[in-house]
Image: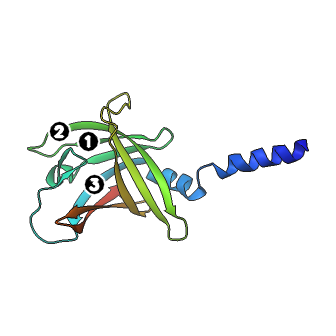
Amino acid sequence: MKRLILLLVTLSIISCGTPKTVRESKKVIKGDWVLNSITYNQTGTFNVTLFDDASKSCFEGSTWQFIPNNNTGIYTINSAGCMSGERNFVFTIQEVSPEMGLYDFLLKPTNEKNKSETNQGYRVNLSQLSDTNMQWKQTVSLDGQPFVITMNFTKI
């Protein structure tokens, strides 16, 4: 009877653990990245503020550091004419579909002590991740239609 209970407890702990693919993704994302380009699925001129922080032109060229052992990071905006400096965040990678390899990336801005003042976060789709490239896609609504923002990163 004791062995059966021990087996059930062990199985429940294992089933609650982080999926292997998410653990592997955290290893790949670790380190420094640069956000090279931001594109939209529609043509035209759009005034988009990303993560309620800055415009597309401010984010392009920003550097990002991911520290997966404590799910924190820092991005630095350094474009001319922008409010430059470091911004802290916490992040989580959630597996959406193991068969399709789809993940959601949750990003929450914080202060230096990793505390969120608004408790507001942002969900993007981690659509590509390799040792050298990463791509995020965020779908928002524009005039009732899906508007996709694609962010392309390269590892430094």
Q: Amino acid at mark 3?
A: Leu
**Is residue 153 visible to the viewer in this orientation of the structure?**
yes
- Image coordinates for residue 53, horizontal then vertical, percent: 20, 44
**Residue at 10% across / 69% down in the picture?**
44
Q: In the image, is 72 to the left or to the right of 110?
A: right
Q: Quadrant of residue 45?
A: bottom left
Q: Residues within 10 Å of mark 2 (few under 14, many from 20)?
A: some
Q: Secondary structure at mark 3?
A: strand
- The residue indicated by pointer 3 is 35
**Residue at 30% across / 35% down in the picture?**
118
Earlier in the chain: of badge 3 and badge 2, it is 3
Mark 3 and mark 2: span between their CA atoms? 15 Å
Q: Foreground: 124 or 69?
A: 124
Q: In the image, is 155 to the left or to the right of 24?
A: left
Q: Quadrant of residue 88?
A: top left
Q: In the image, is 67 to the left or to the right of 87?
A: right
